[in-house]
Image: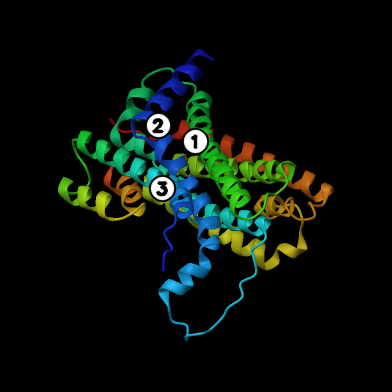
């Protein structure tokens, strides 16, 4: 079963790039955030381990922007 | 006017520094790309997840490209709107809580500029997100299936944009009217859900409702909406938009009187 051909990689590559970009935005913000809503290591784990939803959760809940 | 541009600059810096300008469009693009892609790989996904007896052959009809774009819009209506509500629920309520508002209230502040600067910045971010997401979806649909006529696509996305701006106005109004960000989000989501429910239950009785904007947007990809119904809906939507903005300005002004230092 060779589902992962070159075409698939080319098609999925943009998603991977965006996902990693989202992760980097969230991590940079977390490192520079003096007072996140919860322990930093926990948010770092969530951002890195949970695809897409993790960074969004951090920006919405963990950032304390209100 | 000077005050407005200063406030707008403040909003722009804030949105830049909390990365909203980046991460909200990225979420919308991901939503737009995922829909055509998961449809394209549906046979393989079904294959890999199993659950079908050996030798079972399922013929999946190729989805129409129009359907895929409407499905992308469905994602925006659910997840996209939730993201926008959660991102902007605190834009006025949060400033009152963290003290930025007190700094502004002691100055001779035009509340029209104050509210509109926030509204314009949030709308710009929402529009960038919607267009980026739709264009990504359009591109992937065109590559994997077939292209929707570009004119129809633009009319579709433009009509949906007005709906998004209306939603942003509602969020900012709620943020001005409610004492904290959580209640603002609650009010916005409750209002949207209830109104959408009412419109889907009894909506056949009327044609002019801002809640029908997404439906009219989708019908641009099909046979095109009824011109008079669309014109009146656009007019009613604009009136709602201006009304909500005016109420939001009034509430932001009233917030000043309620501040305790």
Q: Nearer the viewer, residue B197 or B225?
A: B225
How far separated are the C-alphas under marks 3 and 1? 14 Å
Q: Quadrant of the N terminus of chain B?
A: top right
How far separated are the C-alphas under marks 2 and 1? 9 Å
Q: Quadrant of the C terminus of chain B?
A: top left
Lower sequence index among marks 3 and 1: 3
Does residue A24 appear to the left or right of B1 in the view shown?
A: left
Residue occupied by mark 3: B86
> Do the dots labelled 3 and 1 sit on one chain?
yes
Residue B36 in view in this figure: yes
Placement of A36 over or under B209, stated as above or below: above
Q: Secondary structure at mark 1?
A: helix
Q: Residues within 10 Å of mark 3 (few under 14, many from 20)?
A: some
Which marked residue is nearer to the observer: mark 2 or mark 3? Answer: 2
Percent across and percent down for residue B46 are 48, 73
Q: Residue furthest top?
A: B2
> Do the dots labelled 2 and 3 sit on one chain?
yes
Lower sequence index among marks 2 and 3: 2
The answer to whether marks 3 and 1 mark residues whose Cβ atoms lie closer than 8 Å is no
Q: Secondary structure at mark 2?
A: helix
The answer to whether marks 2 and 1 mark residues whose Cβ atoms lie closer than 8 Å is yes
The residue shown at (74%, 47%) is: B233
Q: Nearer the viewer, residue B40 or B73?
A: B40
Percent across and percent down for residue B231 are 79, 44
Residue B92 in view in this figure: no
Residue occupied by mark 2: B15
Q: Nearer the viewer, residue A31 or B1?
A: A31
The residue shown at (21%, 52%) is: A45
Marked residue chain, label 3? B
Residue occupied by mark 1: B125
């Amino acid at each position: 079963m060779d589902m992962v051909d070159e075409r698939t990689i080319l098609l999925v590559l943009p998603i991977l790039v965006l996902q990693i970009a989202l992760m980097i935005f969230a991590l940079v913000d977390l490192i520079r955030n003096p007072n996140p809503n919860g322990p930093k290591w926990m948010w770092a784990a969530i951002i890195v381990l949970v695809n897409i939803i993790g960074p969004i959760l951090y920006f919405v809940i963990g950032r304390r922007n209100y | 006017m000077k005050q407005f541009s200063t406030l707008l600059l403040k909003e722009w810096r804030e949105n830049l520094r909390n990365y909203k300008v980046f991460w909200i469009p990225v979420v919308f693009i991901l939503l737009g790309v995922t829909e055509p892609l998961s449809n394209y790989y549906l046979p393989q996904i079904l294959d890999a997840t199993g659950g079908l007896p050996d030798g079972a052959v399922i013929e999946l009809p190729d989805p129409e490209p129009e359907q895929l774009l409407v499905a992308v819009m469905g994602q925006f209506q659910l997840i996209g709107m939730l993201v926008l509500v959660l991102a902007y629920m605190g834009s006025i309520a949060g400033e009152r809580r963290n003290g930025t508002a007190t700094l502004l209230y002691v100055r001779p502040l035009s509340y029209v500029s104050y509210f509109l600067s926030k509204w314009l910045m949030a709308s710009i971010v929402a529009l960038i997100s919607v267009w980026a997401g739709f264009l990504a979806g359009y591109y992937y649909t065109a590559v994997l299936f077939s292209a929707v006529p570009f004119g129809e696509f633009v009319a579709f996305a433009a009509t949906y944009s007005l709906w998004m701006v209306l939603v942003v106005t509602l969020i900012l109004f709620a943020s001005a009217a409610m004492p904290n960000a959580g209640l603002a989000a609650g009010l916005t989501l409750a209002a949207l859900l209830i109104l959408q429910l009412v419109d889907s239950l009894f909506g056949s009785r009327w044609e002019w409702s801002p809640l029908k904007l997404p439906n009219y947007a989708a019908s641009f990809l099909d046979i095109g909406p009824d011109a008079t119904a669309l014109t009146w809906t656009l007019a009613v939507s604009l009136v709602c938009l201006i009304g909500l903005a005016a109420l939001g300005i009034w509430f932001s002004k009233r917030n000043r009187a309620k501040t305790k230092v």
